[in-house]
Each structure stands twice: as structure tokens, then as C-alpha cells.
Amino acid sequence: MTFQAPKGTFDWLPPRSERVLAVREALVAPVRRAGYGYIETPTFEDTALFVRGVGESTDVVSKEMYTFTDKGGRSITLRPEGTAPVVRAVLQHGLHNGQLPVKLWYSGSQFRYERAQKGRYRHFSQVGAEALGAEDPALDAELILLAADGFAALGLTGVRLLLNTLGCKECRPAYRAALQEFLRALDLDEPTRARIEINPLRVLDDKRPEVQAQLAGAPLVVDHLCEACKAYHEEVRALLAAAGLAYTDDPRLVRGLDYYTRTTFEFVHDGLGSQSAVGGGGRYDGLSEMIGGPALPSVGWALGVDRTILAMEAEGLLEEDGAHQRVQVYGVPLGEEARRRMFQLVAELRRAGLAADMAFGGKGVKGAMKGADRSGARYALILGGRDIEAQAVQLKDLTTAEQTEVPLAEVVDILKGKFS
Ligand code: AMP
């Protein structure tokens, strides 16, 4: 019997898997340069952290969590998102008692039991950045700019920024009431009617055409903002404009997690079909208090690594650039004694900083040379019994097929020179 990866998951294999590492690195390079420190939290947390932090009425919590009881009888959930765990860790370790804002970034797997389709997986990879403990429009603008810089560094030109504000605890209640009044008068199914009472903003996010058609005249949060929220949002917009970052005001952007307040944003790419969001985030001033901490106004984002790679594919940025170079040098030993000597030589080459591999599995010279070609190496080192006697090795340039004999004692230095 053979196994398949579970539905909604997939494997990254070489050489494409190298892209995942490179994309993660490129997306977080801007935040690292901006003084964000790396945080790694467990892959699973107490279920209650997400129920309270992300919100019971969200799809993520109500339908998509991988929750199980561990052998100690605790309810555990594989993390569906990274923000609640980061806030939990900050509170647990008292990081918020030091210099504010606390600036952190993370990278890791997220788990959501979603309807699997292209760009929407049950196991996916995000990088994220969070700035905790400061209410400052410049911080919102900084994070947005850093995400945009990450996408740009990858060569992406089709990423668009959608921007909105969701108000705060002063102005949101009146807006919520106005929205509820509007929604109650619509023709909606029972689960949606229930949602109106628990979290009416989420109804605006309903993607079904029959629902969207009825939402045309819905009250918008921008028309209900208090003076403070208005000024805050204007400052974020002005800072982005001054930085030369284009954005579209999207007064209907609400996003799927409950904790967002004020600034909300999404990065979308039009080459991805229905799963167009490559990243998103916003301000979550109430999250810390929702999970038992002090007031800790914060802002953050998460970028989808898998979807970013799909976006790069859509823009033709991942065309195969010729044969993949796995190593620089490939050893072809002929015979037992040569195999032992080559084993040492390859180890020396690696210690000298060169990427080197050799033929394994007792292959004949033909099979070993094929291995050399497939490895993408520039040079093959061919070593036979007679070479060992002469303390020499044949150095073959695989691009020109030119072969020269070099002293075994000098080959590491010679190769180092060729690659320097
Ligand atoms: P969210 O945590 O829902 O705000 O998502 C942030 C980003 O993660 C999105 O913009 C996507 O790029 C990515 N993402 C979210 N859910 C999935 C999923 N099921 N599969 C792949 N990527 C996802």
C-alpha cells in the first residue's frame, strides 16, 4: 500500500522547493531591516486561544480548525493563523513591559480545514510581521510599505493594495447597529441571519452573488467613523501616498478574523483567480484584552507564501532558468580504492565551501557521468587507479568537455580558484 499526502496538502520538491526558501527570505528581508525580531511559537496552542482571539463566529474558528484532545485531555488546535499565538507569547513573557512597540516576525505552517482548490490549501505557509503596543499611524503605514517592498523585491508588478478602516470601539457600535438594521431587512438564509446578530460585518464579506447583490446599498463604515478614526486613517493614507505607494480605498474590505480594528488591508493579485489575496492584515487593538492581557494596540500582517509563488508563476517570473545547478563539482570514482579517495576529496571540497557530490551505488563510468550531467555541476572529477598512483585526478569541464590532469594535492585550491 502506498500513501498520498492528505487532501488539501502537497509536497514541495527540489528544485522548485528552493523557491519556497528564497520567497520566504525575500518577503521577510524588509521587516528584518526594519528592526523586527524573529519569533517562533509552537505549531499548536490551547484551542481557547483561537476561540477567544480569532472569534467564535468566524469561519476559521467555527468550521476550519484542526482541533483534537491530547492524551492529557487538553483541547489542542493546530494554529490556523499566527497573530493570536504571537500576542499570547508576548503576554506570557512580558515583552510588552519593555520598549514599545515590540516588533516581531514569524514564518511557518498554518492549518485550516478549507474547501481545497488552487491557491487554497489545508496546510499552507505564511510569513508574518507584528508591531505590538503602539497606536501610531506611521506604524500601520510602515508595515504596509514593508510588505509591498517584499513583493516588489521578488519582481512582482501585479500586486495591488486594498485599504480600509473598520473604526474603533467608540464608533463601531453605532455602525454595527446601522448595518444590522439594514441587513435584517434583506432576504437571507438562516445561518446568515444568525450572523447578523453575532458579527454583521462578516456578512459584508459573504462572497455569494445572491448575497452580494443585496448589499449594494449597505451602510459603509467610512460614513460612521469617529473623528479620531477619521484622522488616523487620513494619516495612514497620507503616509502611504507620500511614500509613493499606490492603493485603492475599498470601503467593503472586512477580512475574516474578528480582531481587526481601524486600518485593514489586503494585497491582491489578479493572476490568481478566485483566491486572489496574497497577503493581508491590519490593526487589532482589542486582541490582547480578548485573551486576558492589558490594552495593547497593535498592527500586523501575514503574507501567503504559496500564493506568492503562484503569483510569480502567473507573471512568468519562475521560468526554468536552464538546468538546475544542484552542485558545482561531481566526483566520478572508478573502482573501490578511488571511491574511498573520492569520498575524502568530496568532503574536503565541501569544507572548502564548494557544493560537491559524487556517484554513489557502485555505478559504472557511464552511469556516473550521467549523474555528473544531471547534477548541474560545472566540473567532474574523474579518479581511476592509475590516477591515484600518479597522485593526480582528471578535471573535466562539463560545459566544454575539456579535460585536464591536475595534482590531487592541488585540486581543492584549483577548484576554489575557478569558483571565486
Ligand atoms: P489570513 O490569515 O486569512 O489573513 O491570510 C493571510 C494570507 O495567507 C492570505 O492573503 C493568503 O495569501 C494566505 N492564505 C490564507 N488562507 C490560505 C489557504 N487556505 N491556502 C493558502 N494560502 C492561504
Image (cartoon, rainbow, N blue to C red):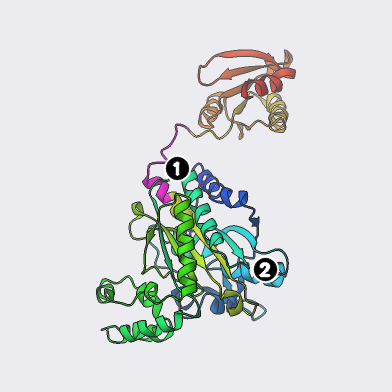
Does mark 1 have its CB less than 8 Å from ligand 1?
no
What residue did someone put label 2 on? 90
Residue 155 is tagged as: 1
Residue 252 lies in quadrant: bottom left
Mark 1 is surrounded, within 10 Å at the Cα level, by few (under 14), some (14 to 19) or many (20 or more) other residues, namely: few
Can residue 322 be found in the magenta stretch?
A: yes
Between 141 and 185, the one lying in front of the other is 141
Q: Is residue 152 above or below residue 371?
A: below
Instruction: State which region is magenta.
Output: 310-323
Q: Visible in this render: residue 248?
A: yes
Q: Residue at x 53, y 21 (%)?
A: 398
Q: Amino acid at mark 2?
A: Val
Q: Is residue 322 above or below residue 80?
A: above
Q: Residue at x 40, y 46 (%)?
A: 157
Q: Secondary structure at mark 1?
A: loop
- Position of residue 171 in the picture relative to residue 28 (left or right): left
Q: Is residue 83 above or below residue 15?
A: below
Q: Amino acid at mark 1?
A: Gly
Predominant SS of the magenta segment: loop
